[in-house]
């Protein structure tokens, strides 16, 4: 589970995140929407411990991130907009290295299986990632999330730049992970994916959670319309 | 985890084409330099051995002559070639290799290799030590400048830290991995270089193993310092480009500017006389005595009177020995005092300069390394002084024996006295006792201590930088 309690972050005079209260339970996919500069990535960075909060706290599976950032990170997996990999290593080598750093040891077969589960065929897994497309890199990121077995997943614009098929595969994977009781926070601009995948959606404007909708509410409403209304309000 | 990070960094370094090219160039340079120096050392040793043998033959076959005249005939002695000089030639190219020993004069070593060199030598001597002192740091910089700053730019730093890796473990692992990559390049070359030593005459070197270990330690500390500082700069810099620019500036400052600046400053602060000034002052003191008020002629006259009085005779012809030989002995004793004073003062001053330059290792670790490297390779001024002092002692004994022979065996007033081969053979060949390894280590001590200080400071900086490691949050 991940939780933000009155989480606040300022950059000089600007308040990037303003008293954010948020809770993502195991099995939930929380879609965090908002325009550029709304504070989505700052929120992700606060959960990752890359930024220190000016108020409130971020908690990952019971660990206060500000108090023990390294300990908190061990409990999560993170997939950024651009999954960064080592270009001189193959996909499987990258996965082996990153999962080892995450404290997990896998046999070569398990690593190939994880990559295949994430949608990357074995032939591609043995190629250096310097030759990979963005979608292929995202798949390695997903495989890493699977490899670490983390119970919390942070996603920052994960489907940005993916083709529809890759985006669909990614969506299927998220749903599978949610079924495995992983708590997923996904910051995104992709209203379609948020509507399709999220169990709850929050709209962040000016660092504040302006609105929150459950899956049931979203099924009956037009998310794009709700979103634009909130933006113009 | 640290070992895993180090292993990845090691593999990544060797997969990096830039490092591979740099490593090949470095290896070629070190191997070429070592082979050239080995050939040069072997040739010099052979030439000097042949020259020494010829010199001995000439001495023994000079024919019959007055023993004091034999002192003027003189003999050349040759400085043994330091086998570790193939690694670091130190001051060897700039000091003489041959000393002419003769009556009345303490000469300076002549046949300076740099004087025989072509203008191409102006570009600098190609030795393994030069490569390790000037170019290996560049290779380290090339290897390390982007190790963290580059990861920050690419986003992999963020990815790695998001896995719960502690920044200190990451920085330490990277440093160890890069160090291992560098070691995997340099250690085999070092071992190959060491094998070359086994083909050289190393009998006259004391503690060769200890010296080689000391050299390995000195260069290890130096390159370790450069590596730790490079990783520190990479961790703190805002971009890999900035890290590279700063590191290259530091390299130029520490390796090019500082040595020149320090050498000139030290020379200005602790000046040494020119050769002409030195000779002039020494000749003046030889004539007028060290106090300047006691002319040589007066002192010799007093000596003659004292001798006559001691033996209760009125004329030198009545003495029970040849007075000319007796005076020569006294004259050599008096000249020895002047030589000791002037050469001692000059050499002490040069050692002061060396110490000051070594102390400037506080500013640039290269200066500390150079000092330690030359001392351990046996090519610093202390080793040259050791040779010059031993040669002078040999000269004095050689002249004393000849003058003593004249005094004892020539009849008073006999200007036709000649000695022969038996006397020449009684004079031993010059053999230089090995410079004790303990003294070499002592001479290298300050440089090694400064290098250790630099290494610890660089590790502390690395530790500090790791604690401040930040990812891009844009």
Image: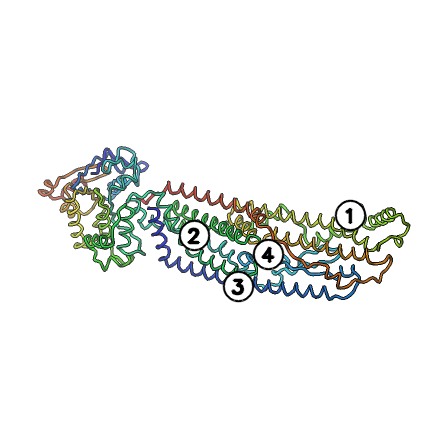
Q: In this image, B326 relative to B255: left or right? A: right
- Give the number of the disc on residue B204: 4
Question: Tag 4, which chain?
Answer: B
Query: Disc 2 to disc 4, how far (Cα)?
Result: 39 Å
Q: Are marks 3 and 4 on the same chain?
A: yes
Residue at (76% x, 66% y) in the render: B63
Q: In this image, B145 relative to B195: left or right? A: left
Q: In the image, residue A5 lies at what x, y percent?
A: 23, 33
The residue wearing badge 3 is B36
Quarter holding residue A23: top left
Residue at (75% x, 64% y) in the render: B421
The crowding category of the residue bearing disc 2, from other C-alpha atoms within 10 Å (few below 14, some 14 to 19, many at least 20), is many
Q: Secondary structure at mark 1?
A: loop
Q: Are marks 4 and 1 on the same chain?
A: yes
Residue at (21% x, 57% y) in the render: A121
The residue wearing badge 1 is B289
| N-term-proximal mark, 1 vs 2 | 2
């Amino acid at each position: 589970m991940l939780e933000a309690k009155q989480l606040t972050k300022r950059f000089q005079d600007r308040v990037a995140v303003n008293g954010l209260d948020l809770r993502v339970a195991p099995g939930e996919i929380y879609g965090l929407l908002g325009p550029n500069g709304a504070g989505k990535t700052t929120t992700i960075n606060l959960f990752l411990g890359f930024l220190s909060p000016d108020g409130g706290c971020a908690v990952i599976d019971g660990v206060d991130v500000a108090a023990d950032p390294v300990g908190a990170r061990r409990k999560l997996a993170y997939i950024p907009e651009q999954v960064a990999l080592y270009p001189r290593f193959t996909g499987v080598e990258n996965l082996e290295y990153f999962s080892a750093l995450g404290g997990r040891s896998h046999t070569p077969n398990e690593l190939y299986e994880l990559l295949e589960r994430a949608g990357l065929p074995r032939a591609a897994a043995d190629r250096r990632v310097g030759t990979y497309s963005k979608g292929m890199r995202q798949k390695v990121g997903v495989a890493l999330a699977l490899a670490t077995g983390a119970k919390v997943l942070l996603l920052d614009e994960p489907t940005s730049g993916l083709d529809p098929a890759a985006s669909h595969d990614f969506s299927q994977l998220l749903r599978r992970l949610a079924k495995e009781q992983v708590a997923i926070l996904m910051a995104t601009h992709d209203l379609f994916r948020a509507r399709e995948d999220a169990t709850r959606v929050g709209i962040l404007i000016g660092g504040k959670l302006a609105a929150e909708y459950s899956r049931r509410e979203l099924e009956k409403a037009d998310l794009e319309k709700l979103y634009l209304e909130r933006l113009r309000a | 985890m640290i070992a895993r990070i180090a292993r990845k960094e090691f593999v990544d370094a060797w997969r990096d084409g830039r490092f591979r090219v740099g490593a090949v160039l470095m290896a070629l340079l070190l191997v070429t330099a070592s082979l050239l120096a080995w050939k040069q050392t072997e040739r010099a040793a052979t030439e000097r051995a042949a020259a020494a043998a010829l010199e001995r033959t000439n001495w023994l076959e000079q024919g019959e002559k007055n023993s004091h005249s034999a002192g003027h005939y003189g003999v050349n002695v040759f400085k043994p070639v330091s086998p570790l000089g193939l690694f670091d030639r130190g001051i060897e190219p700039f000091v003489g290799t041959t000393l002419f020993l003769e009556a009345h004069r303490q000469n300076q070593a002549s046949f300076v290799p740099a004087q025989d060199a072509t203008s191409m030598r102006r570009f600098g001597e190609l030795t393994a030590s030069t490569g390790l002192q000037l170019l290996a740091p560049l290779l380290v910089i090339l290897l390390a400048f982007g190790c963290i700053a580059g990861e920050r730019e690419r986003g992999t730093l963020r990815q790695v830290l998001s896995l719960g890796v502690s920044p200190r473990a990451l920085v330490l692992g990277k440093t160890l991995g890069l160090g291992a990559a560098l070691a995997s390049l340099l250690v085999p070359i070092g071992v190959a270089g060491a094998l070359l030593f086994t083909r050289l005459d190393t009998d006259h070197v004391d503690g060769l193993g200890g010296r080689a270990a000391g050299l390995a330690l000195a260069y290890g500390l130096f390159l370790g310092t450069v590596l730790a500082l490079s990783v520190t700069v990479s961790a703190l810099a805002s971009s890999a480009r900035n890290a590279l620019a700063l590191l290259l500036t530091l390299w130029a400052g520490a390796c090019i500017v500082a040595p020149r600046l320090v050498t000139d400053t030290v020379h200005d602060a602790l000046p040494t006389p020119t050769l002409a000034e030195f000779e002039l002052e020494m000749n003046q003191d030889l004539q007028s005595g060290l106090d300047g008020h006691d002319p040589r002629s007066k002192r010799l006259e007093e000596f003659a009177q004292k001798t006559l009085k001691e033996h209760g005779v009125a004329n030198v012809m009545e003495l029970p020995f040849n007075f000319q030989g007796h005076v020569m002995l006294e004259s050599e004793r008096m000249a020895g005092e002047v030589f000791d004073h002037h050469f001692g003062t000059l050499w002490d001053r040069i050692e002061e300069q060396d110490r000051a330059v070594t102390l400037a290792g506080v500013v640039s670790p290269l200066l500390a390394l150079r000092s330690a490297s030359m001392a351990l390779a046996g090519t610093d001024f202390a080793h040259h002084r050791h040779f010059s002092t031993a040669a002078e002692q040999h000269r004095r004994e050689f002249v004393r024996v000849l003058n003593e022979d004249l005094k004892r065996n020539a009849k008073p007033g006999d200007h036709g006295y000649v000695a022969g081969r038996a006397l020449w053979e009684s004079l031993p060949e010059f053999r230089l006792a090995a410079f004790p390894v303990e003294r070499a280590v002592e001479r290298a001590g300050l440089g090694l201590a400064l290098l250790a200080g630099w290494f610890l400071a660089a590790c502390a900086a690395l530790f500090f930088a790791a604690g401040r490691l930040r990812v891009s949050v844009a």
